[in-house]
Amino acid sequence: MIDLSRLTYYIETFGCQMNENDSERIAGVLEAAGARRAPSAEASGLAVINTCAVRGKSEEKLYSLLGRLRAMKARRGTLIAVAGCVAQLHREDLGAKRPFIDVIVGPDNYHRLPELVAAAGGGAPQVSTGRTRGWREADRGPAVHPSPVSAYVTIMEGCDNFCAYCVVPFTRGREKFRPLPAVMAEVEALARAGAREIQLLGQNVNAYRDPESGTGFAVLLDRVAAVAGPGWIRFITSHPRSFGPEIPAAMARSRSVCRQLHLPLQSGSTPVLERMKRGYAREDYLAKIRILREAMPEIQLSTDIIVGFPGETEDEFRETLSALAEIRFANIFSFRYSPRPGTAAARAEDDVPFEVKRRRLSEVQAFQNTIQAELHRTLVGRTIRVLGTGHSRRDAAVYSGRSEGRQVVNFSASGDPVGRFVRVRITGSGPYSLRGEAVALEDGPAPSVDSCP
Ligand code: SAM
Ligand code: SF4
């Protein structure tokens, strides 16, 4: 048996914020069993890969990392655990094809990691990929929040939407909602610890219903926003179909809810949206944007775009470009369509050639860059509120942070602005970021990691 109190672990995380938050829980469960964090996979006794299955490319990253870990295992005896969506999706053949993996654990089973790791290393992988229906707060265990400044709070998991291209309902399972008292207890504990920003997470947060009382997302947002302390509240991801007018109204009611929203559009063409089974037309989406902008004229919007969905014609693709021109998002995440096992779209022919997908993706990105560069230029000369997050990647003398609209801001400062709200005068801009100088630090020193609940 492996003794966890003598084990060090390292987690490599792929994918979305949900996965980042899951990795915090994996760390919490392992630490509660006595394991300690190592600074790198090389220095660890257990390497956990928390995987993403959303696109083929994210899966490929796992297989190339596994190749490197296998060599490390031969040299140092490192245990290898594969967690998350790929573990769930390929639970049957992952261990058969790669018997050097020690543990395979799906998203509903992280509480079992200590017993799986303790029993690992004896030949066949330890596998736990069972599904639970409904939320089990007791199974969640403590999370290790790496940053006391900005913290994730999961409010729901899974998805019932079954968009034609998406593997998430097969990897994360059906929607499960966290009880409102548990959400509030975590938010309040983070507020007491000094969190400046709280990000509510779920695949489809607007679908939220408290399992006990049926309370919906807008009321949850009111309750979270009423907790004194955190200056900024955000939430991700929203689905346009279930994004009713009560949500912009709740956002507008509280000044601590950021004037920022990620609302995935996917395509600007109604026939493509129909084939994607998204449940809204282009006009419906535009109407929701109008409501948001009427309620909060300064709101910054971001979105997800897929190019090259099966059957996407050139004219349909141009409709996506025209939607970008009309809406003028502050930021977009754009992807080439990638067929995923088990999804409805994977049964259709992937008939848009790779070269066409590639060209459409470059066109979308180049077009969006011009929009972002224009939007950023309008901010030059203004003073905006920024949450300092660290140092700029290129220059350690320059600080980095995010605006309320989630734009990246690199700035100079005389005091230490990391973990604090700062007023920054914007002096320059490019398509991806803003530059500026701090004119005032707003609040006291940043909370320390020790204060995290
Ligand atoms: N729940 C969110 C929503 O409704 O949009 C996001 C889910 S997914 C993790 C994040 C993004 O990945 C999606 O919005 C979509 O743009 C992209 N995506 C999902 N499946 C894809 C696929 N098969 N090919 C390319 N992009 C995909
Ligand atoms: Fe995937 Fe659609 Fe669910 Fe988002 S809403 S997770 S894209 S199935």
Image (cartoon, helix red, strand yellow):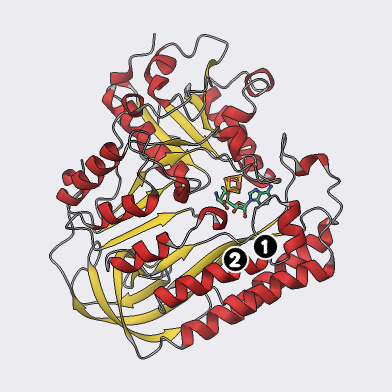
Q: Residues within 10 Å of mark 1 (few under 14, many from 20)?
A: many
x, y percent for residue 37: 32, 34
Quarter location, residue 182: top left
Does 266 sit left or right of 316 as displayed?
left
Name above or below for residue 270 compared with residue 137: below
User: 221 or 300: nearer the eye?
Assistant: 221
User: 237 or 286: nearer the eye?
Assistant: 286
Q: Residue at label 1? A: 281
Residue at position x 24%, y 61% in the image: 419
Residue at position x 38%, y 30% in the image: 9
Using the rendered image of the protein, determine whether residue 325 is visible from the camera's viewpoint.
yes
Q: Residue at label 2? A: 285
Quarter location, residue 260: bottom left
x, y percent for residue 225: 26, 57
x, y percent for residue 176: 45, 34
Q: What residue type is labelled 2?
A: Tyr
Quarter location, residue 249: bottom left
Q: Is mark 1 within 8 Å of ligand 2?
A: no
Name above or below for residue 177 compared with residue 419: above
Does 388 sit left or right of 98 as displayed?
left
Outermost residue toward the bottom in this view: 381
Does 351 sit left or right of 136 as displayed?
right
Q: How many marks?
A: 2
